Amino acid sequence: MLADVTAAALVLHDQQDPLAAKRDAFVLPANTLYLDGNSLGAMPKAAAVRAQQVLAAQWAQDLIKSWNTHQWIDLPQTVGEKIAPLLGAAPGQVICCDSTSVNLFKVLSCAMLMQTGRVKVLSQAGNFPTDLYMVQGLASLLGEQHCQLVLANDSIDNQALEQAITEEVAVLLLTQVDFRSGRLLDMQRLTQLAHAKGVLVIWDLAHSAGALPIELDICQVDFAVGCGYKYLNGGPGAPAFLYAAKRHHARLTQPLSGWMGHQAPFNFDNTYQKAPGITQFLTGTPAILSMSVLDAALEVFADVDMATVREKSLALSSIFHQLVQQQGSLHALQLLTPLEPAERGSQLAYQHPNAYALCQALIKQGVIADFRSPNILRLGFTPLYTRYVDVGTAVAILANIVSSNEYLKPEYAIKQKVT
Ligand SMILES: *Cc1c(COP(=O)(O)O)cnc(C)c1O
């Protein structure tokens, strides 16, 4: 049994935190403890400055010349190269574009076309819905004889999943950190198991990019996708990213063959000829405003060691859970997230029959968390701007909401559109 966590210990942790100074790179509202950076990262100050610059100095003044003079045209590659080190990817393999869902469609189609005689896409029951829906969409386009979604049961030991990786499977599509439970899968092991059976692998990094060290190249991953607006702090609806291993580039065909993925867009040819390298994954005109903001937001990571981020993330979440256990009133909260560090990402998920009301009551008192159906209270830990003392305060507020029955007030039961 660990000793109780004291308020003084939390203050000491903050004083010794190598990432403490990073908090100043963000705009954080007063009287708010933000534990939802896994859903929408907080705003870096540099992002606000860049947004102003792009509007006032670039768009307003330089107008269309900006495509060349401010290198707007290269932004998908520039931002991709800034994300690459966070993914353990050598240059030339990551590009910023579109949404995670759309990018998934592109890489999934590529992977299916690379396989002959195999039609199954294996994923996990409980994977993020958009991942499953995109496979279903491709299956309805191609027909069941060309594409079929197969779901392995979501068991704690991954046994069902590992057994389902057979030579009948074309593509293994997994999310590295589960959006509900926060469970972290073993990328190296699962990728190896898949490759041994001739299966191509796509990893969704939505809840891992910017949260923990990732080694796409070392794990020999085939394809990956992920979000710009979660741990990368790119702002609401920020463009996503896509990784395709260089060894595959020459033989890929992606179906959303728009002009920006053409080898010479400004030749305006009638016939599509894909661009070499990662640029072949572009489709239409990049969203310059939001991509510029993401570009600026990524500067926060320039001098950050992801191992340090990971260490603090695990410490914050461990302490949060320890504090929850110290509070008698919080016994009804059931931790869904594995406690083993190798098996969890940067969030904690608690089941509670009144999880929605708890979440609403927390938000009312300035602790921003979120709710995931049917009964999960989800708390994200973002080491770049969350302090140890914040964790202590958040648990104290949660305990108070429960012991006072505050959360049972009818106002907290009203369902909002976004939970
Ligand atoms: C957040 C999230 C997405 C989001 O996809 P969008 O196309 O950006 O809306 C996709 N996959 C996972 C696993 C997610 O957590």
Image: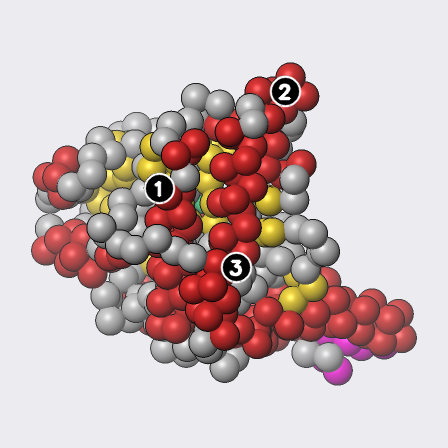
In the displayed structure, would residue 63 be above or below residue 193?
Answer: below
For the record, the magenta segment spans: 62-69
**What's the CA distance linking mark 2 and mark 3?**
28 Å
Q: Name the residue under label 1.
A: 325
- The reply, left or right, for residue 98 in relation to residue 112 is right
Which residue is situated farthest in the top direction here? 410
The residue carrying mark 2 has its beta carbon less than 8 Å from ligand 1: no
Q: Nearer the viewer, mark 2 or mark 1?
A: 1
Residue 34 in the image, given as x and y percentages of width and height:
59, 51
Which residue in the structure is indicated by mark 3?
Answer: 389
Q: Which residue is drawn at 57% across and 73% down?
A: 22
Which mark is first along the chain, 3 or 1?
A: 1
Viewer-side residue, 418 vs 56: 418
The residue indicated by pointer 2 is 409
Which amino acid does the dot numbered 2 rest on? Lys
Foreground of the two, 94 or 87: 87
User: SS at mark 2?
Assistant: loop
Magenta segment main secondary structure: helix
Label 3 secondary element = helix
Please say if the residues under marks 2 and 3 sit with CB atoms less than 8 Å apart: no
Dot 2 and dot 1 residues touching (CB under 8 Å): no
Residue type (three-letter) at the residue carrying disc 1: Gln
Quarter residue 117 falls in: top left
- Does the magenta run of residues contain 68? yes
Residue 120 part of the magenta-drawn span:
no
Q: In the rendered view, would you say 379 is above or below 86?
A: above
Q: Distance between the residues labelled 1 and 3?
A: 17 Å
Q: Do the residues labelled 1 and 3 touch (CB within 8 Å)?
A: no
Quarter assignment of residue 330: top left
Task: Pick whichever of labels 2 and 3 is earlier in the sequence.
Answer: 3
